Image: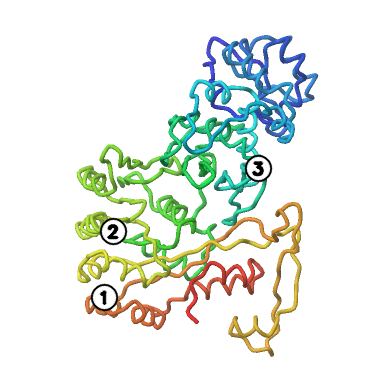
Amino acid sequence: MPGSDHNMPSVSLSNYIIEPEALKLIPESIARKYTMVPIFKIRETLTVAIPNTSDIVALDEARLASGCDIQAIRADESEIIMVIEQNYNISDSIEEIVKGLEGMKVDFLSGKKIDAQRMEKIVGEPPIIRLVNLIIFQALKDRASDIHIEPEEKNIQVRFRIDGILHNVLTFSLEMLMPIVCRIKVISKLNIVESRLPQDGHFSMSIGERNIDLRVSTFPITFGEKVVMRVLDRSTTLLSLDKLGFSPEVLEKFEVMIQKPYGIILVTGPTGSGKSSTLYASLGSIKSQDRNIVTLEDPREYIFEGINQAEVNPAIGFTFANGLRSILRQDPDIILVGEVRDAETAEISIRAALTGHLVLTSLHTNDASGAVTRLINMGIEPFLIASSLIGVLAQRLVRVICPNCKEEYAASEEVYKRLGLSKDKSIHLYRGKGCVQCRNSGYKGRIGIFEAMVLDDNLRELIISNKPASAIKEAAKTAGMSLLEDDGFDKVLKGITTIEEVLRVAFIDE
């Protein structure tokens, strides 16, 4: 239904990626006649941008043409015209867009001077804008967490990281590199002339009701600049702890940890193992109006209502260590430190835990027991670790078998041996055959596997005595800690994932 222009603020269309499917619903003739452009479709409602949201004739035309209910938002007329020029008369096919870029080839070879004015003109042309937008749009459709644009000797390879694995999705001729990279630099507010040094930036876009942040990193390699864009979907609903894949036993242990009034809790694992999701879910479980919760992150991945969030900025001296010192003057009850990267941050975090604060943070180690060794190697005194550490949660993400192509298969003798089971015991194992829905990978989505080490008096004595990680691990197992691979193999037997996935991600002692 049309809205009231008097009360409706104007939106900036530069923050939106126009959905290709929505664009097809309004013919170009109608879009130009009424200066109106479709932006996105949600269920049976098509959202269109128009200068006058009370223009009933235009909105009726849109409704009849699209067969949808119409939601109008107000936008500047000149901006709508620009979006129409950029999007209509351009095929949704990436191949067709690439053809439209013929003649825009730019010499990117090292040592050649780049004409900045020429590049700015090229990256402002509709075909290159459309191409970059479609790459991003496709990545979102494919649930990609990262977009890699990689120059090779003769081609550009575009790869998406989906469920932790990189997939080749698009290939362009190498002459396309400079227009694509410079377009990304322009919207990320990076220096388009500088191609010899790495650069970092970011930009935001809206697709439908989804607010997307993209963290951009450029890096000079042999054949040009490689670009990686980390996709952060602000609209993603944060999961609760019981939706992350915890077994009941490990979940119970971890919930006891995070209910402690003070001390430090470490969540460990490599990059991309879901540590941030676990930390956010933990805060969601324990936040309350009578607690002051402050976070220090790099980057801030979600907006969390009721929590004070800060983002480090090393360029101006706002580091984890400096930020943490300031947080301690903010009367916090609970502190989340995105990551312990150095001895200074580790020491301040532990001191904060010892002075009556609950500190949650992450660390890069292979398993739970290795976290103690890492802190000691950073220069933290063993007695401080033993006095402050509540426990360590180690985790990984394994891919889930695609439900659409899931099939049962007979386990080999090697699988029985790996799972520690006798051939006399009948087991049912599953895998994905591969289908369109899972890009023929056999997997769709991911779930966590975990091990939780809760400190007791025996473990504290071992830490104070500076015993090796292997001794701490054995003692923790004796006290009832199940290992990452145990949790993974349990999910294999439940038909959630495959043994190959567990072996791929878990650090398993032979």
The foreground one among 414 and 330 is 414
Looking at the rendered image, the quarter that the N terminus falls into is top right
Whether residue 13 is situated above or below residue 309 in the rendered picture: above
Label 1: few (<14), some (14–19) or many (≥20) C-alpha neighbours in 10 Å? many
Residue identifier under label 1 = 463
Kind of residue sitting beneath label 3 = Lys
Query: Nearer the N terminus, badge 1 or badge 3?
Result: 3
Instruction: Please name the residue shown 64% across and 89% down the image.
Output: 422
Q: Residue furthest front?
A: 111
Q: Nearer the viewer, mark 1 or mark 3?
A: 3
Residue identifier under label 2 = 261
207 left or right of 455 in image: right
Colour scheme employed for the rendering of this structure: rainbow
Instruction: Please name the residue shown 64% across and 44% down the image.
Output: 155
Q: Position of residue 152 (x, y in %)?
A: 59, 47
Instruction: Please name the residue shown 34% across and 56% down the image.
Output: 360
Do the CB atoms of the residues marked 1 and 3 lie less than 8 Å apart? Answer: no
Structural distance between the alpha carbons of marks 3 and 2: 42 Å
Whether residue 405 is situated above or below residue 110 in the rendered picture: below
Residue identifier under label 3 = 141
Q: Position of residue 74 (x, y in %)?
A: 59, 16
Kind of residue sitting beneath label 2 = Pro
